[in-house]
Image (spheres, rainbow, N blue to C red):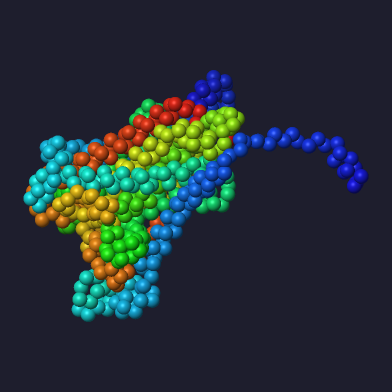
Amino acid sequence: MTEEAASASAVPRPVAATERSAALARANARRTRRNMVADTAMAVASGAALLLVLAILAVILVDILRNGTSRLSWAFLTEAPREGMTAGGIFPAIVGMVEMVILMTLAGVPVGVATAVYLHEYASSVSPITRAIRIAVANLAGVPSIVFGLFGLGFFVQFLGAGIDKLFFGGEKIYGQPALIWAALTMAVLTLPVVIVATEEALRAVPRELREASLALGATKLQTVMHVVVPQAAPGILTGTILAVSRGAGEVAPILFTGAAYFLPLLPKHLWSQFMSPSYHVYVLSTQSPDVDATKPILYATVLVLLLLTFALNIAAVVVRARMRRRLPGGVG
Amino acid sequence: MARRRTTSEKLTVPPARPPKLVLAPAPFWHRGVELLLRCLATSAILAIILILVFIAKEAAPIFYSKAVRAEVTLSKMFWPQLWPGYDESGSVWQPVSEIPKFGVWPLILGTLKVTIVAMAFSMPLGVGAAVYVSQYARPRTRELVKPVVELLAGIPSVVLGFFALMVMATWFQNWFGLESRLNVLVSGVALSFAVIPVIFTLAEEALRAVPNSYVEASTALGAARWQTILRVVLPAASPGIAAGMALGLGRAVGETMIVLMASGNAAIVSWNFADSARTISATIAAELAEVVFGGAHYTVLFFLGTLLFLTTFCINSVGDWAIRRMKKRLGSAP
């Protein structure tokens, strides 16, 4: 724009025109200055937003690390709580969480993988049933966790559990109360969308040629899916499982009424036992502790364990996903 | 006419059809496995339906059970009542008292207030960070920042609730001199930490999906960078950003542990953001463990759960629809 002003001054013109173009040049310079200011303001504002988000994460991490590490030790992870939760460790809670998460994975992952395989390998993308499944998956991911808790209580505990008791145990209350198995199944439903989405992404990344080569060699559709497609998508399935485990380990609301207990003298041995969990432990200790100062170090250490666990799992998921993407550069839509 | 058409029909060569794909003959049990796959695939639909049916089933007695209706009806929940001992009629939530009072407005108002605070913080931060990462950051920075923000999303809500309760509440009280330690402001800000990653992830994806040709065209027309971002890129990505906000809103309304731990749980009717508040989700979480199965209180809590489910279902459906629209729109764009 400034060239225009320069050329205007070089070529002799009527005075009025020169003045006009000079005014134009000044206006342009003003606009350029204004644009520079606005550009900088925009970059600074959006950068500040990002920095603030990162700062929030950093502050949370630093606070929990600083207060949690002093109490964290091997003994803390391998001892039972003592003296009304003011001493000892969280071993039973860790065991309870591991058992719950294993049951959840066994129940949820196969169903999630089957759904993704059906959606991507068998169903046509426009059929009403496919669309209904997709809408259901998207909505399932948005159901509040407390509603899953209500659902677990209403369906698993009071309907399935009480039904099993009536059928097999003559009405004796065994399964018809909050239990490990019901919490795990509730959590399996909650984490279903995580597994489905991750698996489908991995299936999309499997090259078409692999399927065609398999079919051309005389494999049936099912053999192709089982022996070629699903093994290729294994890292994606692993990613989904890791993310589901991370989610399941941290959620509290769904297990509030379906099986979590504040304190148990024994480790959970049966499917119908109640169980302790670090996440529930944090909730109870921080809201219902009679002596806040005495429990605070234990509380911080438990939070640290929970946080490190979920971070480790999430980072593992990111790494697995990144490696998968590198191996299959053509894929991922 | 008719004659000419027949001749032309004779002349046209039928389009070459690809040869029919002849697959290897499958043993019959493969059909069984595939049928099983199909059945398992409907589990998500089944789950949604079962959730609705089984929470609505427990809430239904409010409409027909005489024992429940003696204590609480819909009009008693939603209409201000004149309770003995009160000067004027109002909506009061006191489910465990001599005369149980189930006025839900304090809870709805509490949910609304906390959600407003959470959204007021998370929308500018989430979208702002997404603008920076998608428009200004170098690819290497982006590769680093995105997983870090995902880590924020991975923090369990009970940990955020704990942090709000133990640390933020004290800070806020010192900074602003608030009367009650646990209040709407603290829980709303803590809640926004859970909502920011939702908005950020979807907004960033939407902003990056805007075709480069849009930016090039805008720049060629003489627009400055900020003008391009504000008037071309952001509007083009608006369905995706709106979807992020809708899903974030759904998360904010339904989130339980953070508000349960940090909002103070006082069911009061007030528009003051420095007061304590009690949300619908926190009410369910705090009270369901101690109620009589099948009683009026139990029924009301499941009714609130149904309400929460339907609300978030609608919000999330809007968000989901916006995502689909964005994919269609940007997919067909040059």
Using the image as rendered, state which of residue A16 and residue B109 is in the foreground: B109
The residue lying at 27 percent from left, 78 percent from top is B82
Q: Position of residue A182 (x, y in %)?
A: 31, 55
Q: Residue furthest right?
A: B3
Q: Position of residue A10 (x, y in %)?
A: 54, 19
Q: Position of residue A185 (x, y in %)?
A: 34, 52
Using the image as rendered, state which of residue B168 and residue A321 is in the foreground: A321
The residue lying at 33 percent from left, 47 percent from top is A104
Using the image as rendered, state which of residue B321 and residue A250 is in the foreground: A250
The residue lying at 31 percent from left, 44 percent from top is A102
The residue lying at 54 percent from left, 21 percent from top is A7
Q: Position of residue A234 (x, y in %)?
A: 42, 34
Using the image as rendered, state which of residue A195 and residue A234 is in the foreground: A234
Q: Is residue A311 left or right of residue A194?
A: left
* Residue A156 visible in the snapshot: yes
Q: Is residue B218 left or right of residue A106?
A: right
Q: Quadrant of residue B275?
A: bottom left
- Quadrant of image for the C terminus of chain B: top right
Count the marks: 0
